[in-house]
Image (tube, rainbow, N blue to C red):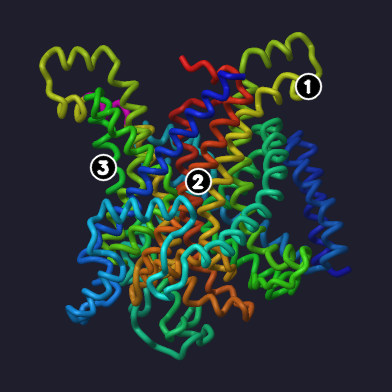
C-alpha cells in the first residue's frame, strides 16, 4: 500500500460521496462502480492497472476541459444567433470542432510547423526519438513527426477533394432527378442501385487495377463510388421539397429547372446535406486511408497516414507504438467529424426521444 | 404461402439481374483499359510479335461480346479462366482461400451477432443515461477507426506485449479445430469490434423507433410490466429490423475482411485480390470482384427476404 493507491481510492470514494450528497445519481453510479471495478483490477493487474485507469481518466478530463474551453471561446467570438446554438452543443461536438480546427491548422501551415521536409532523409532508418526528432525516424530515416504533419495536408486534402467531387455529382444528379422526374429519375435510380450493390472498397480495387494508381484518377474513382449515396439522400430530400406549393408557383411563373434548383430547392435542403457531407467525408477518408494502407492510394514519397502505418508496421513487433500514431490520427479525425455530424443531425431532425 | 414464395422469387430474380449487370460492368471495366490486356501485361517495350502471340493466346482477337459470354458461361460453372501470371486455374487458387475467408467471417459473426443484439437492446432500454452516452462514444470510436488501426492495437497488446495469441494467422492442414480458432482469434476479434459497434447502433435505433410506437404506449398504459412489454409486444416486431441489421452487417464483414486479412497475413480471398490488383492479374481481379459482389447481393437479398417473412405488412406493398 503506497501513497498513490491511497490517494487513488480516496479521490474515487470522496468523489462518489460528493456526487451522492448532491443527488447526481448517474455520476455517483459511474464513480462508485469504477471504485468497485478498481478493487478487482487492482488485485488482478496490480498498481499498473490503476495507473492506466488514472491516465485514462486524466486524458478524458483533459479532452473534456479543452472541449469546454473551446466551446466558450466559440460562443464569445461568434454572433448571437450562432452563439445560442453553440451553447447547447454537447462537449463531444465541441471536442470534435476543436480537433477539426487543429487538423486544419496543421494541414494549412504544414511547411511552417514541420521541422523537416516530408521527403528529407535526416537520420538512420528507425532511429529512436532524440532532441531533433520528436517521434524518431521512419524506415528510410525521415522525421516521423514532420511526415505526420504533412500527412494532415495530403491525406485529408485528398479525401476532401474526393468528397467534394462525390457531392457535386450526387447533388446535381439528385436535384435534376427530383425536378425532372419521369424516365430520367427511373434510369438514375436503377443505375445507382447497381453501383451501390458493389462494395465500395472492392469497386475501387477493380478500377484501380485497371487505371493504375494515379492521384487524379484515384480522386475521380472515389468520387464516383460515393456519389450514389449523396444522390439517394438528395433525391429524397429534394423530393419532399419539390411537391411544395412555392415550387409549383415558381414553375408556373415560368422559371427554368436551373433556377428552381439553385434558388428554391437547394436553400431548403442545406441542413441534411451538410450533415451528409460530414458523414460522406468519413467514409471517403477511411477508404482513402485503407487504399493507401494497401499500397494502392497515395504513392511514396508523398507523406500519407495510411501508407505510413504499413511502412512502419515492422516496429510494432518490437512493441513500439509509433507506427500507430498516423492510424490514431485517422481515427481521431473521423471520430471528431462524426461527433459534430451527430450533433447537427440531432439539431436538424429534432429527434428528442 | 404462395404469396410469399412469389415475392421471394421476384426478389431473387431482381438480384440475379443486378448480378448480371455487375458482371457486364466488371468485364467491361477491363475493356476500358488504355491499350489492351496484352499491352498492359507486356509493358511498353513489347514487340509487335509478342503482343500478337499473347493476344491470340488470350483470345483477344475475338470481339468483346463473344469473349464476355465465354467468360460468363465459364463463371457460371465455376471456371474463371487462367491467371495471367502463374498460368494456373483461377478457380483452384480462389476456392481454398474463399473457404478461409468464409470461415473467418463466420467466426466473427458467431461472436458478434449475439453480443451486438443483446448490447443494442440494453442500450436502447437505458437510452439517455450515462451508460448510453458512454456506449455511444465507444461505438462511434470503433466505427471511425480504420480496421488496420484496431488490428495493430490488438497485435500490440495481445501478441507482442502479452504473447497470448499469435500475431500472424498462418494456416496449415494439420491444425486441430481449436488451434485454428486460436490462430484466427485476433483477426476475428478485429472484425467483431467493428461489426458489433455498427450492429449495436443500428439495433438501438431500431428498438427505440419501435418503443415510440403507439401500441407500446398502450401496453404501458394498461399496466403491463416492463419486461412483458419487451418480450410480448416489442420483440416480435423487432425481428424484422434486427434481421435486416444482421444481414447488412454481414455484408459489411465481406468488405472489411480485405484490410483485416492484409494486416494479419491471413490466406483469404481479400489478400489475393489486393495482390492481384498490385500485379494487374485481371482474371483473378475479375473473379474476386464477382464473388464479393455476389456475396454482397446475396446477403442484402437475405435481409429483404428476412424482413418480409417476419413482417407480414411488407407482403402487400402499397
N-terminal label among 2 and 1: 1
Q: Is residue A118 left or right of residue A55?
A: left
Q: Relative to B126, does residue A331 appear above or below in the rendering? A: below
Q: Residue A315, position in %: x, y?
A: 56, 79
**Residue at 47% across, 28% down:** B10
Binning the other alpha carbons within 10 Å of mark 1 as few (below 14), some (14 to 19) or many (20 upward) gives: few
**Element marked by disc 1:** helix
Q: Relative to A74, does residue B6 appear above or below in the rendering? A: above
Q: Residue furthest left?
A: A254
Discs 2, 3 touching: Cβ within 8 Å: no
Per the image, the residue denoted by label 3 is A169
Per the image, the residue denoted by label 2 is B296
Q: Relative to A256, does residue B124 appear above or below in the rendering? A: below
Q: Nearer the viewer, mark 2 or mark 3?
A: 2
Looking at the picture, tell me which residue is in the foreground, B173 or A30.
B173
Which stretch did the figure color magenta? A264-269
Say which mark, if any, is on residue B226: 1
Q: Residue B262, position in %: x, y?
A: 53, 67
Discs 2, 1 touching: Cβ within 8 Å: no
Q: Quadrant location of residue A150? A: bottom left
Cα separation, mark 2 vs mark 1, equals 38 Å
**Residue at 77% across, 24% down:** B231
**Residue at 82% across, 56% down:** A38
Q: Relative to A154, does residue B239 appear above or below in the rendering? A: above
Cα separation, mark 2 vs mark 3, equals 25 Å
Amino acid at each position: 500500500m503506497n501513497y498513490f493507491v491511497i490517494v487513488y481510492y480516496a479521490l474515487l470514494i470522496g468523489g462518489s460521496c460528493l456526487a451522492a450528497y448532491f443527488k447526481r445519481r448517474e455520476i455517483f453510479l459511474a464513480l462508485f462502480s469504477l471504485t468497485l471495478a478498481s478493487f478487482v483490477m487492482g488485485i488482478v493487474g496490480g498498481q499498473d492497472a490503476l495507473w492506466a485507469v488514472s491516465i485514462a481518466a486524466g486524458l478524458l478530463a483533459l479532452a473534456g476541459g479543452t472541449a469546454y474551453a473551446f466551446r466558450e471561446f466559440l460562443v464569445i467570438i461568434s454572433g448571437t444567433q450562432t452563439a445560442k446554438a453553440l451553447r447547447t452543443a454537447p462537449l463531444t461536438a465541441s471536442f470534435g470542432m476543436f480537433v477539426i480546427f487543429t487538423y486544419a491548422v496543421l494541414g494549412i501551415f504544414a511547411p511552417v510547423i514541420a521541422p523537416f521536409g516530408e521527403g528529407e532523409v535526416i537520420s538512420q532508418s528507425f532511429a529512436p526519438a532524440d532532441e531533433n526528432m520528436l517521434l524518431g525516424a521512419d524506415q528510410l530515416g525521415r522525421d516521423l513527426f514532420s511526415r505526420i504533419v504533412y500527412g494532415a495536408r495530403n491525406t485529408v486534402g485528398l479525401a476532401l477533394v474526393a468528397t467534394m467531387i462525390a457531392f457535386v455529382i450526387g447533388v446535381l444528379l439528385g436535384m435534376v432527378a427530383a425536378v425532372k422526374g419521369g424516365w430520367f429519375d427511373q434510369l438514375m435510380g436503377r443505375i445507382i442501385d447497381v453501383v451501390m450493390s458493389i462494395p465500395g472498397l472492392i469497386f475501387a480495387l477493380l478500377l484501380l487495377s485497371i487505371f493504375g494508381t494515379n492521384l487524379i484518377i484515384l480522386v475521380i474513382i472515389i468520387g464516383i463510388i460515393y456519389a450514389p449515396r449523396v444522390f439517394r439522400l438528395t433525391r429524397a430530400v429534394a423530393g419532399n421539397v419539390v411537391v411544395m406549393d412555392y415550387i409549383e408557383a415558381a414553375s408556373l411563373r415560368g422559371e427554368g429547372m436551373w433556377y428552381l434548383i439553385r434558388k428554391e430547392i437547394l436553400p431548403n435542403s442545406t441542413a441534411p446535406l451538410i450533415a451528409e457531407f460530414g458523414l460522406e467525408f468519413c467514409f471517403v477518408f477511411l477508404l482513402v486511408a485503407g487504399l493507401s494502407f494497401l499500397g494502392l492510394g497515395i504513392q511514396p514519397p508523398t507523406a500519407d497516414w495510411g501508407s505510413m502505418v504499413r511502412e512502419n508496421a515492422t516496429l510494432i513487433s518490437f512493441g513500439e507504438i509509433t507506427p500507430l500514431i498516423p492510424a490514431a490520427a485517422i481515427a481521431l479525425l473521423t471520430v471528431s467529424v462524426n461527433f459534430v455530424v451527430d450533433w447537427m443531425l440531432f439539431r436538424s431532425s429534432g429527434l428528442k426521444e | 404461402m404462395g404469396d410469399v414464395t412469389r415475392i421471394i422469387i421476384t426478389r431473387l430474380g431482381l438480384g440475379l439481374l443486378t448480378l448480371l449487370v455487375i458482371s457486364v460492368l466488371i468485364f467491361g471495366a477491363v475493356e476500358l483499359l488504355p491499350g489492351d490486356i496484352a499491352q498492359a501485361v507486356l509493358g511498353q517495350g513489347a514487340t509487335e510479335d509478342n503482343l500478337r502471340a499473347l493476344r491470340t493466346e488470350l483470345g483477344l482477337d475475338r470481339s468483346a461480346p463473344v469473349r464476355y459470354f465465354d467468360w460468363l458461361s465459364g463463371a457460371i460453372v465455376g471456371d474463371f479462366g487462367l491467371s495471367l501470371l502463374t498460368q494456373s486455374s483461377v478457380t483452384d487458387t480462389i476456392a481454398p482461400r474463399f473457404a478461409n475467408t468464409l470461415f473467418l467471417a463466420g467466426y466473427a459473426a458467431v461472436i458478434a451477432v449475439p453480443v451486438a443484439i443483446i448490447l443494442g437492446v440494453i442500450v436502447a432500454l437505458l437510452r439517455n443515461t450515462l451508460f448510453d452516452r458512454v456506449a455511444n462514444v465507444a461505438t462511434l470510436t470503433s466505427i471511425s477507426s480504420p480496421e488496420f488501426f484496431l488490428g495493430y492495437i490488438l497485435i500490440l497488446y495481445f501478441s507482442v506485449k502479452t504473447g497470448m495469441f499469435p500475431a500472424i494467422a498462418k494456416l496449415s492442414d494439420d491444425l486441430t479445430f481449436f488451434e485454428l480458432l486460436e490462430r484466427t482469434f485476433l483477426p476475428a476479434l478485429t472484425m467483431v469490434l467493428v461489426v458489433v459497434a455498427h450492429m449495436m447502433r443500428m439495433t438501438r435505433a431500431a428498438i427505440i423507433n419501435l418503443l415510440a410506437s403507439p401500441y407500446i404506449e398502450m401496453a404501458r398504459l394498461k399496466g403491463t410490466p416492463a419486461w412483458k412489454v419487451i418480450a410480448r409486444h416489442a420483440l416480435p416486431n423487432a425481428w424484422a429490423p434486427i434481421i435486416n441489421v444482421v444481414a447488412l452487417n454481414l455484408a459489411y464483414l465481406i468488405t472489411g475482411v480485405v484490410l483485416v486479412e492484409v494486416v494479419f497475413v491471413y490466406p483469404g480471398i481479400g489478400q489475393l485480390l489486393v495482390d492481384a490488383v498490385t500485379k494487374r492479374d485481371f482474371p483473378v481481379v475479375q473473379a474476386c470482384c464477382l464473388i464479393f459482389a455476389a456475396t454482397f447481393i446475396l446477403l442484402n437479398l437475405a435481409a429483404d427476404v428476412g424482413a418480409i417473412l417476419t413482417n407480414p405488412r411488407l407482403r402487400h406493398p402499397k
